[in-house]
Image (cartoon, helix red, strand yellow):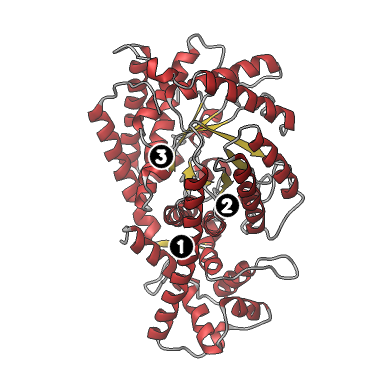
């Protein structure tokens, strides 16, 4: 894409990345010592366990809870399940159903480790082959239909009813949307299970389930073939079930997942170790299946001032980048986030927005950067709101952003109506088309406002990273250094779902993913 350039202090850029690596190296040591109930449930899902009990409890939850009750969880769920499969000559699904009916795995004889290891490798390979096949199909479809120009127009549908979502998604694609996100039902991120089946009720969104993923995927592929361009599907992984959502997304061929290393900690008060561990496994799955992650730095600017705390966005992007690299992710899959959230009453606010957008674009030059719309200062004055969306779209196309979550003029007032989304698309289509090659004509002054401001934010980010490296990321979060929200390392939701691995712990899916991605520790 044609875009202007700015000069960043290269030594400062290299130093910032070095600091972020050192920070995440410390946390990775903690991650490697732990697993979580969601990680173990993700393994079971990839082994083919599906369905719910008569009480609508997912079978994977029943199995993991039983293994925890039997005090066997510290070794991981795989070995006892595979042992039972061999002894009873049954599938993983049949073993799960038998556990629901009262089977006690402790009562079974133990088969030799060699037989278990062989069976685990067979199950892991079969599962990953299925994901590979899905990913290859998506790549072929993208080549066949063609990729729309950037910024991709990203639109949210959120009726609560997956079948209504499909109707809205089709309408949006016909008006020019390139990416459809089905936002989750309110507070699903705090459910310690993944709901089951097609759902027709939700609050502020639609539940993320495997069946809902499948229904929307089919609908988007059908409409993509009619309009002649590839349509990307998005859902949300951050929360208590990150690894499971990533596994289901990989199986159903989603293109993008909201997946942030710290969002759950800061904005959902989920335990730190739980979130850091879960993000690693979920990103291994994303890296393997070619799913782009979108990080949530835009949220920082809804709780803190967008100028005063702009550097926290940059510092977090650099930390997210290093966590993603540790999981084998390529830059082309890292949709690091930022936002257009400066108070519109500030003089030269647009210059600040351009400077911040250019910093993100220059710092992560080949990444699919995700740019978020104004929300904090959206107003009931829809004319002013529409003007803000227009400036947002202009900054995006001029500075060469990759993914543009379209602003809705009644954002933060109610769940947007169809015509609000229609107006958002009309605005983006107009601005993107009329300013398509504006960026190639723009030259920012050497040491002018934009360049100076970008380097100033970068220096402030380095100061924060230095402090975080010195005290450790856990302590920095406790201090409220990110988003002005302090969290306790030994608190938060989901803490009881974290456990320390024993010497005998085994997770063949993780092992195989790390081997294939070249990140084996």
Closest to the observer, 257 or 243 = 257
Locate residue 252: give its quadrant. Answer: bottom right
Depicted 177 relative to depicted 9: above or below: below
- Distance in Å between CA atoms under marks 2 and 3: 19 Å
Q: Which mark is residue 476?
A: 3
> Helix, strand, or loop for circle 2?
loop
Q: Residues within 10 Å of mark 3 (few under 14, many from 20)?
A: some
- Distance in Å between CA atoms under marks 3 and 1: 23 Å
> Helix, strand, or loop for circle 1?
strand
Residue at the (67%, 54%) spot, across then down: 215
Depicted 63 relative to depicted 321: above or below: below
Q: What residue is disc 2 on?
A: 493
The x, y position of residue 126, in whole percent, is 47, 71
The x, y position of residue 357, in whole percent, is 43, 24
Locate residue 18: give its quadrant. Answer: top left
**Mark nearer the N terminus (1 vs 2):** 1
Q: What residue is disc 1 on?
A: 35
- Distance in Å between CA atoms under marks 1 and 2: 15 Å
The x, y position of residue 43, in whole percent, is 50, 67
The x, y position of residue 298, in whole percent, is 51, 32
Query: Is 252 on the left-hand or right-hand side of 324?
Result: right
Residue 392 seen in render: no
Image quadrant where one finds the C terminus: bottom left
Image quadrant where one finds the N terminus: top left
Closest to the observer, 280 or 493 = 280
* The furthest residue to the left: 11
Depicted 148 relative to depicted 213: above or below: above
């Amino acid at each position: 894409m044609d875009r202007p350039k700015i000069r960043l202090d290269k030594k400062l850029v290299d130093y910032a990345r070095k600091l972020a690596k050192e920070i995440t190296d410390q946390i990775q040591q903690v991650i490697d010592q732990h697993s979580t109930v969601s990680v173990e449930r993700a393994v079971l899902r990839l082994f083919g366990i599906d369905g719910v009990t008569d009480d609508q409890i997912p079978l994977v939850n029943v199995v993991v809870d039983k293994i925890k009750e039997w005090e066997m969880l510290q070794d991981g769920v795989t070995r006892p399940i595979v042992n039972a499969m061999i002894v009873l000559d049954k599938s993983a699904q049949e073993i799960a159903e038998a556990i629901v009916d009262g089977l006690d795995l402790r009562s079974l004889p133990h088969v030799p480790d060699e037989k278990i290891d062989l069976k685990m490798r067979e199950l892991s390979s079969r599962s990953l082959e299925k994901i590979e096949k899905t990913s290859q199909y998506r790549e072929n479809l993208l080549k066949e239909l063609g990729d729309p120009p950037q910024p991709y127009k990203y639109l949210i549908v959120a009726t609560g009813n997956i079948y209504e979502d499909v109707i809205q998604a089709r309408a949006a694609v016909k008006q020019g949307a390139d990416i459809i996100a089905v936002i989750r039902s309110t507070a699903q991120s705090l459910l310690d299970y993944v709901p089951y089946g097609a759902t027709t009720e939700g609050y502020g969104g639609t539940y993320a389930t495997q069946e809902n993923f499948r229904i929307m995927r089919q609908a988007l592929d059908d409409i993509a073939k009619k309009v002649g361009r590839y349509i990307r599907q998005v859902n949300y992984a951050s929360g208590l079930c990150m690894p499971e959502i990533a596994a289901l997304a990989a199986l159903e061929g989603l293109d993008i997942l909201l997946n942030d290393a710290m969002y759950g900690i800061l904005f959902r008060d989920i335990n730190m170790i739980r979130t850091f561990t879960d993000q690693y496994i979920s990103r291994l799955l994303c890296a393997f299946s070619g799913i782009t992650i979108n990080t949530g730095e835009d949220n920082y600017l809804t709780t803190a001032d967008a100028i005063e705390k702009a550097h926290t966005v940059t510092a977090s992007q650099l930390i997210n980048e290093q966590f993603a690299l540790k999981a084998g992710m390529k830059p082309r899959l890292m949709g690091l986030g930022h936002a257009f959230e400066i108070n519109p009453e500030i003089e030269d606010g647009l210059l600040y927005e351009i400077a911040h957008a250019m910093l993100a674009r220059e710092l992560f030059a080949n990444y699919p950067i995700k740019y978020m719309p104004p929300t904090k200062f959206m107003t009931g004055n829809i004319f002013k709101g529409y003007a803000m969306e227009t400036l947002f779209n202009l900054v995006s196309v001029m500075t060469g952003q990759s993914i543009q979550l379209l602003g809705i003029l009644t954002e933060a007032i109610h769940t947007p109506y169809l015509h609000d989304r229609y107006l958002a698309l009309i605005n983006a289509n107009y601005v993107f088309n009329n300013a398509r090659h504006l960026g190639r004509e723009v030259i920012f002054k050497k040491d002018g406002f934009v360049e100076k401001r970008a380097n100033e934010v970068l220096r402030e980010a380095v100061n924060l990273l230095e402090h975080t490296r010195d005290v450790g990321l856990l302590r920095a979060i406790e201090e409220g250094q990110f988003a002005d929200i302090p969290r306790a390392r030994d608190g938060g939701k989901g803490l009881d779902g974290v456990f320390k691995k024993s010497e005998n712990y085994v997770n063949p899916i993780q092992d195989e993913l790390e081997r294939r991605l070249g990140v084996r520790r």
